[in-house]
Image (spheres, rainbow, N blue to C red):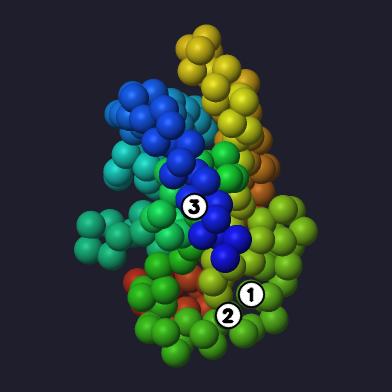
Amino acid sequence: MQGENQGREAGALILDDLEVFNQSKLCFEKEVQTEVWRQIMAYLEAWTNSNRLSGEAEAPTYFFFCPPSWNLGDDLGHVAWFEFQREGEEDSYNVADLCGVGTGRVGLRFKFATKLFGGRRNWLMITKRDEFVQFIERLNFAGFVSDTIGELYMQVIIPPSDIAAAWRSRDWKTALIPLGESLELVKANLDLFIEFVDWARSVSGQPDLGSPAVT
């Protein structure tokens, strides 16, 4: 009942000033969201390049990156990677999710290409090994949250006031500080992630993964 009342109140406020709402909605969808994600993708691209990582924007709101050694070639693809994207139900604006006020979330995720590890059963056996659990615990301690089995996540939240200030001034440095801090945490722990991936490859029992690539 409370949700229905809130919905009616929100609808009434919109209808009371429909012209302003219509203009605001169009501006937000066509200009604000596009610019926010353009700035984020540009920041991610510059950061990966400066840290000699492979990375690219594969969609307007999705960025993929990893050390070059995790690329096993065109036939196999990547053994593991980091991705920055929005996740969750698509019933709120992605910028609202980025600001922590929507129904979804935006952040960095680390994941393995589990299909390369001999299938789900073999992968689950690997995840139960003591060494695997220890790697996860060390990365949890560093600030990464356990999510799906073998995956680690870090949410990125940018305050709406910082995005508003950046939109007005066209200076995005302050607004993107939370993203930069999360990426620097990845950088600080990159050797541990590489060690984790190399270990998983060495115990996989899969010929294609047994010897980590030399860069």
Q: In the image, what residue type sits under mark 3?
A: Gly
112 lies above or below 38: below
Q: In which quarter of the image is residue 196?
A: bottom right
Q: Quadrant of residue 31?
A: top left
Q: Position of residue 184 (x, y in %)?
A: 64, 37
SS of the residue at dot 2?
helix
Residue depth check, mark 1 versus mark 3: number of the one nearer the observer: 3
Pick the front one: 125 or 176: 176
For the question of whether residue 211 can be seen, the reply is no
Label disc, if present, on residue 7 of the rendered structure: 3
Q: Which residue is drawn at 59% across and 31% down?
A: 160
Residue depth check, mark 3 versus mark 2: number of the one nearer the observer: 3
For the question of whether residue 40 can be seen, the reply is yes
Q: In the image, what residue type sits under mark 2?
A: Thr
Which residue in the rendered view is the most extreme toward the left?
Answer: 75
Disc 1 or 3, which lies upstream in sequence? 3
Disc 1 or 2, which lies upstream in sequence? 2
Tags 1 and 2 touching, CB below 8 Å: yes
Tags 3 and 2 touching, CB below 8 Å: no
SS of the residue at dot 3?
helix
**Mark 3 vs mark 2, CA separation in Å:** 45 Å
- Determine whether, in the image, residue 169 is placed left or right of residue 157: left
**Mark 1 vs mark 3, CA separation in Å:** 47 Å
Where does label 1 land, which residue?
A: 132
Q: Position of residue 163 (x, y in %)?
A: 55, 25
**Mark 1 vs mark 2, CA separation in Å:** 6 Å
Where does label 2 land, which residue?
A: 127
Graded by Cα atoms within 10 Å as few (under 14), some (14 to 19) or many (20 or more), the crowding at tag 3 reads few
